Image (cartoon, rainbow, N blue to C red):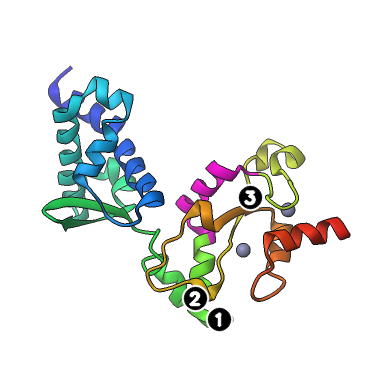
Amino acid sequence: MNRRVVEQGLKDRFFPIIARIIEDSQLETPGFVPRERILGQLMKEPEAKNRLGKTKAGNIIDWFSAHFTMHKHGDTRFLRWGPIFNQFERAEIEGQTAYKPISFNAIGIFPDEVNEKAGFLEGATRKVLVNAFERDPRACQRCIDVYGTNCFICGFSFGSVYGKVAEGFIHVHHLRELAEIRKEYLVDPIRDLRPVCPNCHAVLHCRKPAYSIEEVKKFLKVN
Ligand SMILES: [Zn+2]
Ligand SMILES: [Zn+2]
């Protein structure tokens, strides 16, 4: 195999791992993740440790950085990793390249949606932002990874009722009150999100502010 093919294979294998490291870091330390911290985490991955070693792993992070920059500047040679690069923004922090996920930041999230729908919804922008958390695919995925796809309130499972066609379908509900949401709010999928079925979700939102999970669980028992 020529060198280019080998390098492409390494990028295909390790760029998604770098992306996961940046995302996982958000749960502990939200914000930009510098190169050295990515490298440290990458060295904890057995495959990277055994197959690459620290120098080579550093090279791959630098490839990530170089391709990221060129991709963001419109270079079409790196489209195959576009879906990865498009999830992040980059900055120079204390002389190091650093990345953070774009849509975990409330202000950066679905700006079109805010403009488009604010006029139709009570509570306007902030309400839309909160709903946007419930639709952020990566935050939802993290929530589902942790809590599963059964309704957190009633236990409903789309897969077991409707079969394969609906397997894994679930809504995600955002727990925090509007008043708590500040400008620089970062959604923590484990703290702030819960999977709920559309029925329970509708009931949660029957009151403003929304009922708590516990309250709706109690309604279920009473009725
Ligand atoms: Zn439910
Ligand atoms: Zn909700």
Q: x, y (%) of residue 13?
A: 30, 30
Measured as percent of width and height from the top left, residue 38 is found at 25, 41
Instruction: Tell me which image quadrant ligand 2 sits in.
Output: bottom right
Tell me if residue 96 comes above or below residue 167 in the rendering: below
Q: Which mark is residue 170?
A: 3
Amino acid type for the residue under numbered disc 3: Ile
Give, as a three-letter code, the residue at label 1.
Answer: Gly
Camera-near label (2 vs 3) is 2
Which secondary structure lies at badge 1? loop
Contact between marks 1 and 2 (CB within 8 A): the answer is yes
Q: Quadrant of residue 2?
A: top left
Counting every numbered tag in the picture gives 3
Left or right: residue 125 compared with residue 163: left
Give the alpha-carbon distance from disc 2 to disc 3, as whole Å: 23 Å
Q: Name the residue tied to disc 1.
A: 123
Residue that mark 2 sits on: 126
Q: Name the spot of residue 41 as percent of width and height, x first.
A: 29, 37
Cα separation, mark 1 vs mark 2, equals 6 Å
**Neighbours of disc 3 within 10 Å: few (<14), some (14-19), many (20+):** many
Of mark 2 and mark 3, the one earlier in the sequence is 2
